[in-house]
Amino acid sequence: MAFFNFFSILACLGMLLLAACSSTPPTRPAMGNLNASSSATSSQASAPFKSAITGFKAVDWQQIAGWQTDDLRQAWPAWLKSCEALRKRKSELQWAQVCSRAETLAPQDTAAIRRYFENYFQAYETYALNNNSNSGLVTGYYEPIMDGSRQRTPVFTVPLYAYPKAWHSAKPNPAPTRAELMKSNNLTGSELVWVQDPVAAAFMQIQGSGKIRLKEGQVLRLGFSGTNDQPFKSFAQWLLNQGLITRGEATMQGIQQWARNNPSRVEEMLNANPRFVFFKILPSNGAADLGPIGALGVSLTTERSIAVDPRALPLGAPVFLATTEPASSQTLQRLVMAQDTGTAIVGAVRADYFWGSGDSAGERAGRMKQAGRAWLLLPR
């Protein structure tokens, strides 16, 4: 795992949907179950990828909702990134062959890209083996961006930390909670960068990655470096349990507003989550505009990458996703790549949709908790 959206379990708080929820899709989702002819027996055997939790039904391209209308040119760069990783992996699936064929295509030729997938891939509708449902949960996640400094200043007073050097050889067992770490001097000297807002810093920990804009114009890319191995507990749920916010206020924006109104209680709120996340500075190679690195080992592409349960779908594979816009009935149907994972992303028909970087992406990710269907594309 690289972009650790497993912290996105804030989504289980209704509208606090920064990413994925630890809850599982409903047994009878709104989009319905497969009919009897789509049961697990023959379709599971026909798919070259085997899963203990997912069934696969081979379908014609015409059966995929939105396949003919998606602008596949927007997905093509994400697919080429998948190929970078898939070529290096030993697999029974014929990734090397289809990736080699991809090199011959013009990236702006929509018709050629569509023919490429239709000629060299078989589409499989996915469904949960435990209940035969082809509908599941789609949430969203994003990459935070905030201003910061490499040194503490009167403005930037909140540190983001590197993994403690001493822990590489002798990690405490159990490791201290967040509250214990904040009271100790265990992290002194491990400060990577300083930011302004402790709540924004906590949200970056939840996402597991982010970018820091320095005054000099440089952008630092921060990636996940480890945790204190404590369980995640939602400080949003703590606010709800305390009666300090309503469920309608349990959003990223609502929590930030509560923190501004109650600065003396911010640390108490943040300490409700014992888990603490450490970062490392990633090499930018002149490409600070790239997305965060996903579990596949490639940078994620805005609105064309998803996180999945690797028990359900193979990492790197193209997936056609049919869902709706956040808190909306407007259709969202597009080809995406399974390039990330997370411990909160659990289930057969389950996806966490990467909205990109910054506040706008965070606002959309924070509202996304939609029903959805998925078709896995595998080499013929």
Image: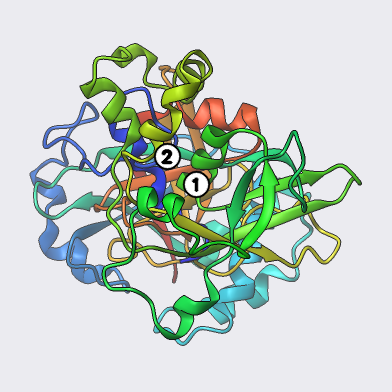
Residue 70 visible in rendering: yes
Relative to 13, residue 297 above or below = below
Identify the residue position indicated by label 2 in the image: 19
Residue 72 horizontal/vertical position (percent): 63, 46
Q: Nearer the viewer, mark 2 or mark 1?
A: 1
Residue 299 horizontal/vertical position (percent): 64, 60
Please name whichever residue, 275 or 105, is drawn nearer the observer in this view of the structure: 275
Q: Residue at x 40, y 48 (%)?
A: 7
Please name whichever residue, 62 or 325, is drawn nearer the observer in this view of the structure: 325
Looking at the image, residue 366 sits to the left or right of residue 69; the answer is left
Identify the residue position indicated by label 1 in the image: 207
Q: Secondary structure at mark 2?
A: loop
Q: Quadrant of residue 201?
A: top right
- The answer to which of marks 2 and 1 sits earlier in the sequence is 2
Image quarter (top left, top right, bottom left or bottom right) of the N terminus: bottom left
Q: Residue at x 30, y 12 (%)?
A: 246
Relative to 84, residue 182 above or below = above
Q: Amino acid at mark 1?
A: Gln
Residue 346 tag number: none
Relative to 100, residue 339 above or below = above
Looking at the image, residue 31 sits to the left or right of residue 188; the answer is left
Q: Looking at the image, do the residues carrying marks 2 and 1 touch, with CB atoms under 8 Å apart?
A: yes
Looking at the image, residue 314 sits to the left or right of residue 54; the answer is right
> Are there few (<14), some (14-19), or many (20+) residues within 10 Å of tag 2?
many
Relative to 113, residue 247 above or below = above
Residue 94 visible in rendering: no
Q: Amino acid at mark 2?
A: Ala
Residue 98 horizontal/vertical position (percent): 58, 73
